[in-house]
Amino acid sequence: MTRIIFCAEDFSPWKTSKQLTKPVVMRKIITLRVILFVSIYLSLSNVGNGQTYSIVDPAQTTCYDTLFLITCPSPGANYYGQDAAYIGTLPNYSISTDGKTVHDNNTSLTWMRSPNTTNTPPVKANRMTYATAQNWLTTVNAINYGGYSDWRIPTIKELYSLYSGKGTDPGGSTSSVGLTPFIDTNYFKFAYGNTALGERVIDQQYMSANIFIKNPSESGYTKDFGVNFSDGRIKGYDTVDVLSGLPKTFYVQLVRGPLTYGYNTFVNNGDQTTTDNATGLMWSRTDNGSGLNWENALAWVRTKNAANYLGHSDWRMPNIKELQSIVDYTHAPDYDSLPAIDTNYFQCSTIINEAGQLDYPYYWSGTTHEGYFSGSSNGAEADYVPFGRALGWPSTQTHWVDVHGAGCQRSDPKVGPPYGYAAFKTVVVSGVTYTGYSHGPQGDAIRGSNYVRLVRNASATSINDQNRNGHSLNIYPNPVAEVCTISFGDEQKQVRIDILNMLGSKLIEINSTNTNTVEINVRDLPQGIFIMNIYVDNNFWGTKKVVKF
């Protein structure tokens, strides 16, 4: 990457022209304009190259075995390879001069400091229903809060960018004393649930713009994916209380800034690896193929590095934010029988779950889900993402269901069963008995034996899929403002391009024969994410996501 530096004597971009000495006023103003132009140009160039999804590290610095806090192990030692062994892009925030907003210097997203316009720690009265949130968003933009009128409800990946791995899970605690939330309170206003008002300590569910793709869900109601910064999880929350039939309420932390954050740009490298140019991460296309406890999962990664697996010896078990970055929330087993991942670029093993269903695994992360206990045994669980059903046996059901939605984030014991504290469930399907353990408010299925997908850092490459279905093509720019080009190199093709919105409605169709370049005018499309279905020589080539800004 080329770095361009402009220098001017005593130049500060925060000085106004009146603060500059007269001999250099014009030179500095012109320089500022050039710097602004180049900054915008380089920002758009980086976006075009796919550098749009900076994963902020959970910043976990402590190490654990399957139960206790330990001294961080050295390379090759037992338990080496967990989250704290690797330093990623550390959190970097700036508070605005009026104190109302926080700018994330890694993601370029700007946030309200609190889910209210009083800029105070949230209280129960600030919670709102899904419908109320839409009206409140309009109000916040109308008052130009913090000097901006382009606030929006964040996607689940935007919201999860705020997750901090330094938090402690309250569990069933009725007091917040000694707890640490899963969000940086140096920058964001936060308060635990007020038990005096009938709330639980963990009642800090924050709404996102992502609705669970199976709608209505198993409960009969819409689920909204949200982050709980009190207990450190992503869950699909029913927007209506199943028992009372009343709308549920959530906090809403509004965001503004780039629309590209959280969208992947995958490339099939042709060697059983997939690179995400948006994050700069390389992944193994396949998983390890069997369930392991957390200790053995870490050990398995070390054996793959010793064998220089797929030509690399720096694989790791992903931290929880890296793992969540490859979730595709447009898929779920009960919706389209697919895992919550892009199966054009990844393969998922299949399992038979506790309900006797064909399903997809839970996947371990290297991030310990620190609990709050009176002793020091607070490292007994690790975070995972279910790319299949997030099974649970809630009190409102008489069977296993996808209670939190494929692609949520929960935690599991680091060791396998039996679990004396959990309910043991038995299901008989076609004469075959299936068993499992259920625990927690929604009866989460706990396993302690999960799968692993490898990740490593990789340099970004171009947005180019080579030799897919016998054809290679390059799409640029993406994101796009006006005209997007698809190039097939020197090959002449018969091409059809369909552009659909996220609801599946076709907006544009382009047909071209004997061509190696197709230009698509998207000038009249609104800002947002669109699906591009590509057909080459009358065969379906594949699907790409296109961002219009």
Image (cartoon, grey):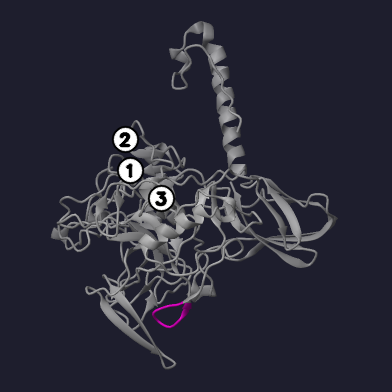
Secondary structure of residue under mark 1: loop
The answer for how far apart the CA atoms under marks 2 and 3 are is 46 Å
* Residue 409 visible in rendering: no
| Front-most of residues 80 and 109 | 80
Locate residue 202, reporting x and y percent. Answer: 24, 59
Q: Is residue 362 above or below residue 16?
A: below
Instruction: Tell me which amino acid carries mark 1.
Output: Arg
Q: Which mark is residue 76?
A: 3
The answer for how far apart the CA atoms under marks 2 and 1 are is 8 Å
Which range of residues does the magenta coloring cover? 352-358
| Front-most of residues 356 and 21 | 356
Secondary structure of residue under mark 2: loop
Which comes before the other along the chain, label 2 or label 1? 2
Q: Main secondary structure of the magenta part?
A: loop
Instruction: Tell me which amino acid carries mark 3.
Output: Gly
Mark 1: give few (<14), some (14-19) or many (20+) Cα within 10 Å. Answer: many
Q: Which residue is mark 2?
A: 99
Is 353 in the magenta?
yes
Q: Which residue is mark 1?
A: 113
- Which quarter of the rendering shows the N terminus? top right
Instruction: Tell me which amino acid carries mark 2.
Output: Gly
Locate residue 254, reporting x and y percent. Answer: 39, 49
